[in-house]
Image: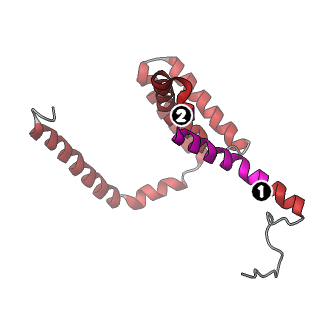
Amino acid sequence: MLTKNLNVTFSMVWVIVLSNVIAVGVSFLFLQQLARLTYIKGTLLVPFLLVLLALGAYTAHNSLADIILMLLAGAVGVAAIRWNWPRSPLLLALVLGDTAERYLFLSNSLYGWSWLGRPIVLTLAAVTLLGVFGPPLRRRLRRRSGVDHSGPPAVGATHAG
């Protein structure tokens, strides 16, 4: 389509650009009303959103299993909030997991297990290990030396720099 119908392709791109500009303009017109939506109580908003989410999940494949999966994902999210687990790694895994798995199999089929010895892989592994084990190791070394800087400074303490 890019080589044969270039005018159609550029027309589609410009329609998207123009529609985004119009949408931003309309959003600015209704900014005050949209900001008031943040004051709606959760007890009123959650049932409405659950109906919309269930409708969207069901229409994806016309399957009740999609609604059950949506509810399970919501339960995992609520549990993560209750137990103070970060949700960012979970979302990152959901977004990048498929791509990471695909390229893992691709690397394994091209190089066998020798890809683990490549310099970029070793560098990424070292940085990851340093990020995971560095802070606890540093805390342990500070405790051994008798100086612990992990807490807040004392009231009235000054920092000599």
Left or right of residue 58, residue 142 in this image? right
As shown in the figure, which amino acid type bears the numbered disc 1? Arg
State the residue in front, 47 or 8.
Answer: 8
Q: Quadrant of residue 135?
A: bottom right
Left or right of residue 127, residue 98 in this image? left
132 magenta-colored: yes
State the residue in front, 104 or 93.
Answer: 104
At x 53%, y 41%, the residue is 119
As shown in the figure, which amino acid type bears the numbered disc 2? Leu
In the displayed structure, would residue 111 be above or below residue 47? above
Left or right of residue 118, residue 18 in this image? left
Query: What is the x, y in percent for residue 80?
Result: 68, 40
In the displayed structure, would residue 122 be above or below residue 104? below
> Magenta span: helix, strand or loop, mainly?
helix
Query: What is the x, y in percent for residue 105?
Result: 49, 24
Checking the image for residue 155, the label placed there is none
Q: Earlier in the sequence, mark 1 or mark 2?
A: 2
Checking the image for residue 138, the label placed there is 1
| SS state under label 2 | helix
State the residue in front, 74 or 106.
Answer: 106
Q: Quadrant of the N terminus?
A: top left
Numbered disc in front, either 1 or 2: 1
128 magenta-colored: yes
At x 54%, y 56%, the residue is 39
Report the residue marked by disc 2: 94
